[in-house]
Image (spheres, helix red, strand yellow):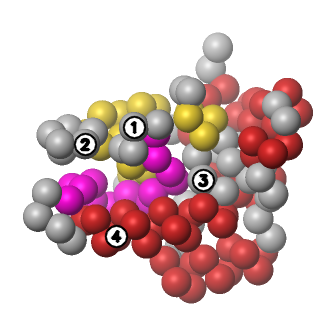
Amino acid sequence: MNTKTKEKLLSQLLELPNELFGQPATDEDIHLFEQQFGPIPESYKWVLKNCGKMIIGSDFTDDIIQLSESHKKFNAEKLIGNGWTLKDIFLIGWDGAGNPIGIEIQSGHILIEYIGDAKTTVLLNSIDEIAKP
């Protein structure tokens, strides 16, 4: 993640009420999460530790507390017949309609899968696109 993106994310944090962003994650929080669910991409780890969450469009991603529950839910729902089909992603939250949003591990793309049709759309090519005007 580049410096411009970090500055943009930190400025969003200052512009909005603290309760919208939650508490930044500690190193211990990160360690405990990764023991249970696997590694967090470095770019999102920075977000969790410095901002708590971030905004993508009109939606907030999960903070470290919400992330554990979201990963449990997502992993369970992938196993059902019409479950989520996103693969090789790190889930970072849900949009307002309940569609999962994740970081594709290989590319860094921010993806969303829509309920009912398994259509996957790239929301951002990377977290760095948040800093573009």
Looking at the rendering, the stretch of residues picked out in magenta corresponds to: 83-95
The three-letter amino acid code for the residue at tag 1 is Ala
Mark 4 and mark 2: Cα distance apart in space: 15 Å
Q: Which residue is mark 4?
A: 75
* Label 3: few (<14), some (14–19) or many (≥20) C-alpha neighbours in 10 Å: many
Q: Residue at x 68, y 73 (%)?
A: 30
Q: Quadrant of residue 9?
A: top right
The three-letter amino acid code for the residue at tag 3 is Asp
Which label is found at residue 106?
none
Is 59 covered by the magenta stretch? no
Q: Quadrant of residue 20?
A: top right
Q: Which residue is mark 3?
A: 62
* Label 2: few (<14), some (14–19) or many (≥20) C-alpha neighbours in 10 Å: some
Mark 2 and mark 1: Cα distance apart in space: 8 Å
Name above or below for residue 53 compared with residue 90.
above
Q: Residue at x 49, y 77 (%)?
A: 38
Task: Name which of mark 4 and mark 1 comes first in the sequence.
Answer: 4
The three-letter amino acid code for the residue at tag 4 is Asn
Mark 4 and mark 1: Cα distance apart in space: 18 Å
Q: Which residue is mark 2?
A: 115
Mark 1 and mark 3: Cα distance apart in space: 15 Å
The three-letter amino acid code for the residue at tag 2 is Ile
Q: Residue at x 35, y 34 (%)?
A: 122
Residue 63, image x, y percentages: 66, 57
- Circles 1 and 3: CB distance less than 8 Å? no
Mark 2 and mark 3: Cα distance apart in space: 19 Å
- Circles 4 and 3: CB distance less than 8 Å? no
Q: Which residue is mark 1?
A: 97
